Amino acid sequence: MRNGRSWEMEDKTKEYARKLEKFEAEKAEKAKAFNIADLVANAKTLRKVEVKDVGEVKYGVLTLRDSAALAKAESNEQRSSMMLWLMLRKAYPTLKLDDVEDLPMDVAAKILTAITRDMGFLTQQQTQ
């Protein structure tokens, strides 16, 4: 025979399990729904990253429109400069490509590395 507390605990456990199941079902349903407006709005949201020895840097993510500009770059160096400029100018509209190209290499590399760290397709991981 169970005491009152055991029944209460079992009831609460079942209640939480039902709530979790409902939450997971709602989450799965939302994940299935493709909403272009949400994706575009998210792409326009500024992000920020803390860059060692530089400070907080704000930027925007690259879009397909940006890829057309990147395709015009003639070298990897130009592509890197343009990529950094395209992301930074979303937060700093007066920034010029020349400004980015005049950054010290180590600073530009730190910023680009910090920004692209979580964008797996933009960074190359060394494999052995």
Image (cartoon, rainbow, N blue to C red):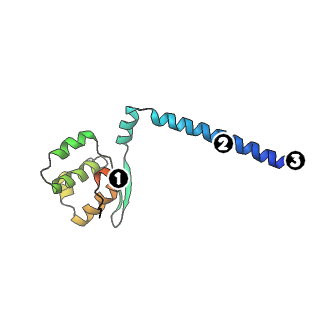
Q: For mark 1, give the secondary structure.
A: strand
**Earlier residue among tags 1 and 2:** 2
Percent x, y of residue 109:
26, 62
Q: Which residue is mark 1?
A: 58
Disc 2, SS: helix
Specify the quadrant that holds the C terminus.
bottom left
Name the amino acid type tagged 3.
Met
Residue under circle 3? 1
Q: Is residue 91 left or right of residue 96?
A: right
Q: Residues within 10 Å of mark 1 (few under 14, many from 20)?
A: some
What crowding class fits label 3: few (fewer than 14 Cα within 10 Å), some (14-19), or many (20 or more)? few
Q: Quadrant of residue 42?
A: top left
Residue 85 coordinates in the image, percent (x, y) = 23, 51
Measuring from the top left, give residue 79's x and y in whole percent: 19, 52
**Secondary element at image label 3:** loop
Label 1, label 2: how far apart the Cα atoms are: 41 Å
Q: Amino acid at mark 1?
A: Lys
x%, y% of residue 121?
A: 30, 50
Q: Is residue 94 visible?
A: no
Residue identified by numbered label 2: 17
The residue sitting at 25% across, 48% down in the picture is 86
Q: Residue furthest left?
A: 74
Amino acid at the residue labelled 2: Ala
Q: Sequence-wise, which precedes: disc 3 or disc 2?
A: 3
